[in-house]
Amino acid sequence: MEVKLHDIGEGMTEAEILNYFVKKGDQVLVDQPLVEIRTDKMTAELPSPGKGVVRDILIDCGSTVTVGTTLLVIENSDVVTTNNSDFKNGLQKENLEQTSSETFRILAAPYTRKIARENGINIELVKGTGPAGRILDEDVYRYIEQQKSLPITVEQIQNATHNESPTVVQQVGPLHQINTIPFNGRRKQIAKKMVQSMFTIPHVTHFEEIDMTNLLSIKNNFKHLEREISVPAFFVKALTIALHDYPIFNARLDETNETVHLYRNIHIGLATDTQEGLIVPVLRNAESKTIGEIHNEVRKLTKKAQENNLGTKDITGSTFTISNVGPLGSTGATPIINYPETGLMAFHATKEKPAVYKGEIAIRSLMNISMSFDHRVADGGTAVAFTNRFKSLIENPTLLLLELV
């Protein structure tokens, strides 16, 4: 069986041979990557259209050849033809693409197969909803959600955090050594959640600068009265008011039923950095709590998270998440949304800087915020209006207190 350079889309006529993943005598399987090529628009991997043994490699790496040139020869069995129209459809969705072949009786485009492969999904287990049972991108995403969207239970967290110490040193060559740590437990759960969010949600991040001077003054006044109120408590309260005014960010998109669910109650997820990794305890019904009650509950939930004592109810059901990374020294970021929510706001470090205030240069306490949102559900103008509402409440804490009357 001759494996030839074929048109992988975008009207290519030639390509450069970058690298072979196999050598003469290797056993290869169907859909196994054989060679990496580069055109003027993309880099791609050509897979094997059948299984067998590599008998000869005809073109050297670094060579540029035209479409139709035989690259290598495989003594094969179970040859499978490639559906070029499917391949081109897949290529329209990303620049870094792999070809594929229709194996067995599974109908799926190359890009769809790539999604399944990169997420460790056996595509044969996915139910296709396209014509003739063809598996669509949406079918794979839906299967991923079904497998990954279950909440992390306390038992899973406890089991995951045991025995995560580095393994023994491994020898890599005569002079170099590396340590390894296991990629499992909570770290693996976090990774799955992040991949799910990035694969599913088109993220947009809006940035804003907020003058914290007046709020910090009020906070210090509480301290003089021997009443401690943390800054995040003010943030949460201001967010409940802003979310009430812009409920599209206190929502979830139900793609299956083509509906956006707007939630009446506001359950704030509190992204918390712990020794075992990131976890998000949930402050429930924040809209009905006072600033003092919010302060007390945030402290309790953070303490439980640090001590790994959160219950199932403590870590499920959030409708909007915040991340207070300022104490760590952060000045900006593009946060990943806590799927399946619509928005996440991150608060960065507050720094004293010269700024124009009431027409004069003054030293003010300024903080950056990042607001990531799901662009399928909300647009940039709405996000700016939402953050402006939050900003007005924080910069004018008297207005915030009046809203609570």
Image (cartoon, rainbow, N blue to C red):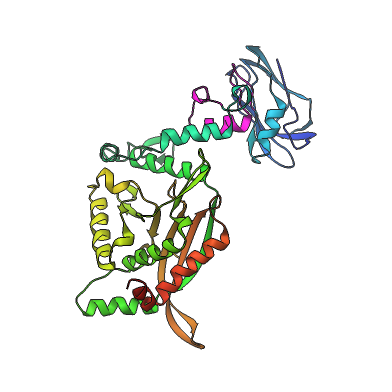
| Residue 276 visible at all | no
The answer to whether 175 appears left or right of 130 in the picture is: left
Q: Give the range drawn in magenta.
A: 100-128
Image location (x, y in percent) of residue 248: 48, 56
The answer to whether 334 appears left or right of 231 in the picture is: right
Q: Indicate the quadrant where residue 265 lies.
A: bottom left
Residue at 42% x, 33% y is 147
Residue at 46% x, 69% y is 389
Image location (x, y in percent) of residue 22: 61, 24
Q: Which of 7 and 109 is in front in this view?
A: 109
Residue at 45% x, 45% y is 194
Q: Does the magenta stretch include residue 230?
A: no
Q: In the picture shown, does residue 115 fall above or below 267?
A: above
| Residue 92 visible at all | yes
Quarter holding the C terminus is: bottom left
The answer to whether 76 appears left or right of 177 in the picture is: right
Q: Which of 164 and 192 is in front in this view?
A: 192
Q: Indicate the quadrant where residue 20 lies.
A: top right
Q: Nearer the viewer, residue 108 or 392?
A: 392
Q: Does the magenta stretch include residue 103?
A: yes
> Which residue is farthest top?
77
Image location (x, y in percent) of residue 346: 43, 60
Q: In the picture shown, does residue 90 fall above or below 194?
A: above
Residue at 68% x, 39% y is 92
Quarter holding the N terminus is: top right
> Which residue is farthest left?
226
Image location (x, y in percent) of residue 183: 38, 38
Q: In the picture shown, does residue 96 fall above or below 210?
A: above
